[in-house]
Amino acid sequence: MPLAMPVSAAPYAAIVMDARTGETLYAKNADTRLHPASLTKMMTLYIAFQEIEAGRLSLDTMVTVSKNAAAQPPSRLGLKAGQKIAMRYLIRAAAIKSANDAAMAIGEHIGGSQAAFAKRMTKTARALGMKNTTFKNPNGLTADGHLSTARDMNVLGRHLFYDFPQYYGIFSRRTADAGLATVTNTNSRFLDGYEGADGIKTGYTGAAGFNLTASAKRGNKRIIATIFGGTSTAQRNAKMVELMNMGFGMAKGNVREKAPEAAPVPADALVATANPAIDEPDVEGGAAKTIRVSGEVIRSVRPKARPGAGNTDAAVAMAAAEPAPEPPAPEVPDSVSAAIAASVASALAEATSAPEGTLDAQAQALAVAAEDGAAPDLAAEDTAVALAEVPPAPAAPAPAAGTLEAQAAALAAGAAPAETPAPAEGTLEAQAAALAAAPAAVAEPALPTVRPQARPEKLAAAPAGQPEAEVVVAEAETVLEQVVPMAEAAPAPVELAVAAPEPAAPAPKVTAVETVSARASDLPETTEAPVTRKAPIFDPVQVAAAEPAQTEAEADADLVVIAKSTSGGAHWGVNVGAFTSRAEAERALMKTALAESATLNGGLKKTTQKGGAWRASFLGLTEDQADLACRRLRARGMECEAMGPG
């Protein structure tokens, strides 16, 4: 005999939706207002995530538990009135264990009271498109007017996935530390029993029955479904499996993902009036280090203009056109003015007159006499004294005969200088004297017109009986080269001596002697002395033969390229699925990076097209990082495949 359903059994309602687009694939009683039970906590957590992202709340904020929160019926974390606990532990307890006292503590801390927080919950529901939902408390315990629908709860679960992907992973945790105890997920059976399941929340009361909002992903499809009024946990889970399978079968493979629009966050949402110092830093129970700072400018910081500042140009023009009148000079009697003028003239005369008997006094007397036209009467004795005071200059000693000083003194006196003794024959001084005594041949007008002949490759040997002027030089020294015109009787060779090197230095190497000769027929006839000029003589330069050019092939053969790896062994990667479009692949990379930021944060996101599908991958990982990332992602029901080098 079949078992009859109890009379008080809760009504059944269900909906299946394509989470990527929000398209409804199946619905039954989806808009019937029913008791949502602990599915209500999804809205409590949604608002808590809003406050955290807005910066008005943090996971480390200490919350003081009220008597009302501590008195909530099971399921409970076990909070005590007056106890202080971190917000992160309350979120874990409400999301994983579905603790009623933790949810109430969250709501009262954010809203200031249960009623105030319930009003914000309903207002947020309207902003999300939940048209048939009204909340009365943060935990979902049965209350008059506390109602929702399967469609509205499905919409709320989809918003949690898209609006807060960084926190969505908490709904897939099997266990977590909640401060007072380690809590276990009430949805563990479905998470472990259905492939691809990764959330999200269960609920149960006597009036509501066994409720569940669940989400799962397979391939590039994601389905979200909600059940109201299940008769037991097992029956509810079995029905959810049927709905999920139906949804994956009906969902299209290639669709454009359409994320829902998140609800706006009120500007003054955090209203914890029970504690006036709730937003003060370093206050126990306060919002950690969060400080509200308003950047709104109430009044202009620019200083006000002075009165009449707008007429500045006109005032300046008027001032320039009409100069201020000068004050009248005080009247001085004529007798006083005459006395002042006489005193000033007397003082100036005393200051400028020289002492009597000095040269300055005599100069002043001469100047006065010149003005009057009469010669001054100077005393003879004064003149004699002045002349006697000038001492005669001492006679300079006569310079030695034959020196330059003696010659200069003779020239200054107008006499012929004494003859300088002739230098010894063969010395540099004798040669310099001979050259100085010879007339300058460079002034000859015919010489500039004569162009020298080009030097032959090899100098021709000089004719016999015709000696050459030889110049012997030391290496790297500039010497005098003498050009001698050829005549019938050539002069004797002239050899110029050079300074000998210091004894400590090695003897200089004597290079080849270069001799330049010119024929008499090539130069104009002249009886002038030979012309000398400076000309450096250089050693012959040997030019090394150029090596044959190296061919490009030989250069390439000798080229050796050495490459050093800088990746540090990060040659692994992970593939998180194949998608129909590049946009879907990039969104998958973003969601995966948010879900597993610990290991994939340093990886390189890359999308590649192969075989008509776009593959989403993270590259640049080590083997340990790739293995750990895949194990964590698979534990959450997400696709992951490690890729090794090569």
Image (cartoon, rainbow, N blue to C red):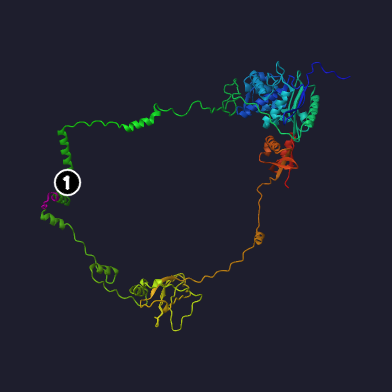
- Can you say whether 356 is above or below 280 in the image? below
**Element on which disc 1 rests:** loop
Question: Was residue 373 drawn as part of the magenta stretch in this picture?
Answer: yes
Extreme right residue here? 1
Residue 581, horizontal then vertical, whole percent: 72, 38
Q: Nearer the viewer, residue 407 or 371?
A: 371
The residue at 13%/56% (across/down) is 383
Image position of 358 (left or right of 248): left
Residue 405, horizontal then vertical, whole percent: 28, 68
Residue 145, horizontal then vertical, whole percent: 70, 16
Q: Can residue 79 be seen in this view?
A: no
Question: Was residue 240 drawn as part of the magenta stretch in this picture?
Answer: no
The residue at 49%/79% (across/down) is 460
Q: Nearer the viewer, residue 248 or 620?
A: 248
The residue at 64%/27% (across/down) is 50
Q: What crowding class fits label 1: few (fewer than 14 Cα within 10 Å), some (14-19), or many (20 or more)?
A: few
Image position of 564 (left or right of 499): right
Q: Which of 285 and 332 is in front in this view?
A: 332
- Please report the bounds of the magenta region as a residue range: 369-377
Q: Quadrant of residue 342?
A: top left
- Can you say whether 7 is above or below 15 in the image? above
Residue 193, horizontal then vertical, whole percent: 79, 31
Q: In which quarter of the image is residue 572?
A: top right
Looking at the rendered structure, the kind of residue marked 1 is: Ser
Q: Mark 1 points at which residue?
A: 353
Image position of 36 (left or right of 307): right
Image position of 58 (left or right of 398): right
Q: Is residue 303 visible?
A: yes
